Amino acid sequence: MKVFAFINQKGGVGKTTSVVTLGSGFALKGYRTLLVDCDPQGHIATQLNISKAPGVRRWYYDEEPLEQVIVQVRENLWVLPGDKTTDRVLGRMREEQWGAAEFADRLREESTALEMDAVLLDLAPSLKHLQIAAMLASDYVIIPTRLRYTDLDGVNEITRSITETARRSRMPGKYYLLPTFFDRVTKETHQRLVELVNAFGKQVLPPIPQDVRLAEAPGRGMTVWEYAPQCQAVQGYVNGSGKTIGGYAAILDELVALLGGV
């Protein structure tokens, strides 16, 4: 089993969309997958057309077994839903010295007992106790980021936090950057992507092209694989040299390789 935490202190960078798209992609490939909604806004439920629910609170704060509070939404795909009561989890972590470590240990132990292959955590835009707990639970941190100057500046803060958390704990400290909202006709996004690759090298995943169908899919109660499997955000786009660039399908292949420990 591998745990992926999707973290950025900025909002609107595509965290939830990436969690739902990649998580449902794992499930379509036959991997037992759990999505954990650690954001009080509960947007995973919204994107998958299910009701928001106090699942995270019931599991961690009320200490109910994970298997009793998860919801199956597709074949091989389960959700631990969240809502505004998820804030109680953060409150408890502030009060308990080992709260973040307890969260990480319980999540990994109970997910393993349920024979999950992949667990994806969606975090609110912040770098507080719950984000640290997610880092401790994770094998890999994925940092979705828009290709804008102000967003890239925030990436450095997150990577420093990951490095510091790894230094003080047993977490692997492995992370990848996921460029989102890539606009193939805008010079700034190309320039920022080059800057990101120059700074982080192979830790930068292929970019996700902008595609309006990503936003349309949840309104129809579908994942993008179901609604528009051939859209650029999923399959990438073909450049002038005939090379396919980016897309969630390419990201999914890379993460599947990580499931196998490659």
Image (cartoon, rainbow, N blue to C red):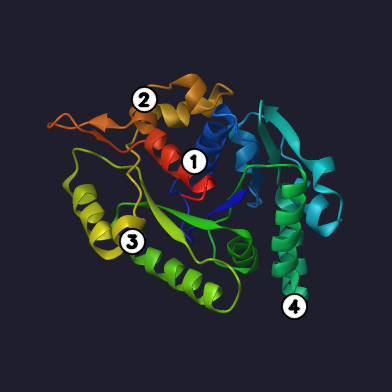
> On the rendered structure, is 66 left or right of 83?
right
The residues bearing labels 3 and 1 have C-alpha atoms spaced at a distance of 26 Å
Is 213 above or below relative to 98? above
SS type, badge 2: loop
The residues bearing labels 1 and 2 have C-alpha atoms spaced at a distance of 21 Å
**Residue 201, visible in the rendered structure:** yes
Amino acid at the residue labelled 1: Val
- Specify which label sits upstream in the sequence, 3 or 1: 3
Q: Residue at x 16, y 29 (%)?
A: 242
Is 110 above or below relative to 183? below
Is 40 above or below relative to 24? below
Residue bearing mark 3: 152
- Specify which label sits upstream in the sequence, 1 or 4: 4
Amino acid at the residue labelled 3: Leu
Q: Nearer the viewer, mark 4 or mark 3?
A: 4
Q: Which mark is residue 97?
A: 4
- Specify which label sits upstream in the sequence, 4 or 3: 4
Residue bearing mark 1: 256
